Image (cartoon, helix red, strand yellow):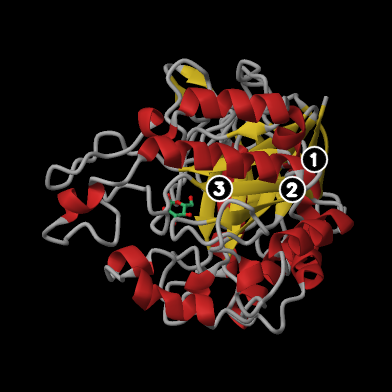
Amino acid sequence: MPPLPEPTLGDTPWFMHDRFGMFIHWGLYALPARHEWVKSQERLTDAQYQFYFDHFDPDLFDPSAWAKAARAAGMKYVVITTKHHDGFCLWDTQQTDYKAPNTPAQRDLLRAIVDAFRQEGLRIGFYYSLIDWHHPDFTIDIFHPLRDMPDATDLNQPRDMGRYAAYLRAQLGELLTQYGQIDILWCDFSYPDRVYNGLPGKGHQEWQSDLLYQEIRRLAPHIILNNRLDLQKIAPDFYTPEQYQPQTWVQVNGKPVVWEACQTFSGSWGYHRDETTWKSPEQLIHLLVNTVAAGGNLLMNVGPTGRGIFDPRAEKALAAYADWMQLHSRSIYGCTQSDFTAPSGVRYTQNGNRLYVHLLHYPFRHVQLPGLAGKVAYAQFLHDASEIRFKEAHAGRSWDEDVLSEDAILLSVPVPKPDVITPVIELFLK
Ligand code: GLC
C-alpha cells in the first residue's frame, strides 16, 4: 500500500474508509437560480437581494427524500451549507436575523436536514462560509458585491473585522454544540493575497484563525477540518481540490495528505436552471473511480431548487451512482490507491488482497495487466460474480510473445460490454 498521511487531531480513518459524500448547496440563491455567487457577480445590493429572502418558501422541502437519495447513491456522509457567502443562515442562529426562520420557510431548516440524514445513517458535516456579503462588519473586498462602488474605501471605515471574527466564533459555537456530533467542518475560504483597487484580501488575520481553531477543537476535539482557514502552524485534517481531478495521491510539501475532491453535476454549486454542462453518467462514475484510485474522497454536490427538491437532472445523476454503487461499492469503500500500476484505460483501487480493475474503456476480448503474473489466485466480474478466466506468461515463454509482456496476466472478457456503466473485475491476490 502507498505511504499513509501522517495522523492529525481529526478523526480521519472513518472518512478515508467511507470515500463518498454528498455536498449540498442550498440557500436564497436557489431562487435567482443562476449561481450561488449571483450577488457578487451581478453586484447586487442588499435591497436587490432581499427579494430572495422575502420569497424563500420551499414548500416541497422533504429532507428525508434527500437523505434517501444520498444513501441509495452510496454516499456515507453529507456536507451542508449552513451559511454561504451571501451570509444567509439555514439555522436558527441567535447572532443575526438573516436566517431561515425569518423567511416564509419559518423554521430551522438545518435541523430538519441533520435529523433526516442521521436517520438514514449518514454522518454530518457542516460547510460554513468565512465570507459574508451581508454582515455589516465584513469589509468590502475583491469578491464583495459593493467592490466597484466609487466610495468602497469610505464604506469600509465603520466596518470592523474584529467584531466579525467574534461573530464567526459565536456562530460556529452554535453549530458545534446544538446539532449533536458534527464530523466534518468545511470552512470556505481564504484569499489573503487578493488585493483589489487597494482593498485587501482576507486570511488568517481577518478570521483570527488561530483563535477560531482553538474554539473548534475545544468544542469538537475530533472533528475533521479542511484546509481553507489559512492556518499558519497547524496542519488541516484534509485538503480540498475543487472541480479538479488529481491523477495521483495529493501531496503537500512532498508528503501525502488526506484529500477530498469536491465536484458538481453541472459546474454550479447552487441550483442553476439554465446550465447545460451536466456530466454524463459515465463521467460521474469515472470521477468517483479516479478519485479513489488516487487515494481520495469524492464530495459530489447537489443544489436543491427553491421549492426544496432535487431537480430531475440531479435525480438522474444520483440514480447513475445508485445503480452502479449497488453492485460496485466493494471497489470503493475501504479502498485506496494500489501499488500496482494500471495500464491505459484501466484504473485500480485496492483493499487488502482485493485488487479492483475498473475498465474505463471496455476492451475487445482481452485485458493485459503487467506486473501481476503469479500474483492472482482468482478473478471475477464484480457486478455478477462471474468468473473471468486468465492466462499468465511464464518466465521466458509467453502465452503469446507478440502481445504479452513477461510479467503480465491476460484476462478474457466477453465481447459485449456488461450492462453496467463501468465494469469492474475483482482480482483475489495470492
Ligand atoms: C468555492 C466557491 C463556492 C463553493 C465552494 C465549494 O470556493 O466560493 O461557491 O461553495 O467553492 O468548494
Residue on which disc 3 sits:
128
Could you tell me residue 238's position as x and y percent? 57, 31
Q: Residue furthest front?
A: 158
Circle 2 or circle 3, nearest the eye = 3
User: Residue at point 37% right, 28% down?
Assistant: 205
| Residue hosting label 2 | 124
Secondary element type, mark 3: strand
Query: How many marks do you count on the picture?
Result: 3
Structural distance between the alpha carbons of marks 1 and 3: 16 Å
Element assignment for label 2: strand
- Disc 1 marks a residue whose amino acid type is Gln
Q: Earlier in the sequence, mark 1 or mark 3?
A: 3
- For the residues labelled 2 and 3, the Cα–Cα distance comes to 13 Å
| Whether residue 421 can be seen here | yes
| Residue type, label 2 | Ile
SS at badge 1: loop
Q: In this view, does 172 lie to the left or right of 223?
A: left
Residue placed most toward the observer, 380 or 288: 288
Residue 254 at x, y = what percent? 44, 16
Q: Can residue 271 be seen in this snapshot?
A: no
User: Is 4 left, or right, of 47 in this rendering?
Assistant: right
Mark 2 in CB contact with mark 1 (< 8 angstroms): yes
Where does label 1 land, which residue? 181
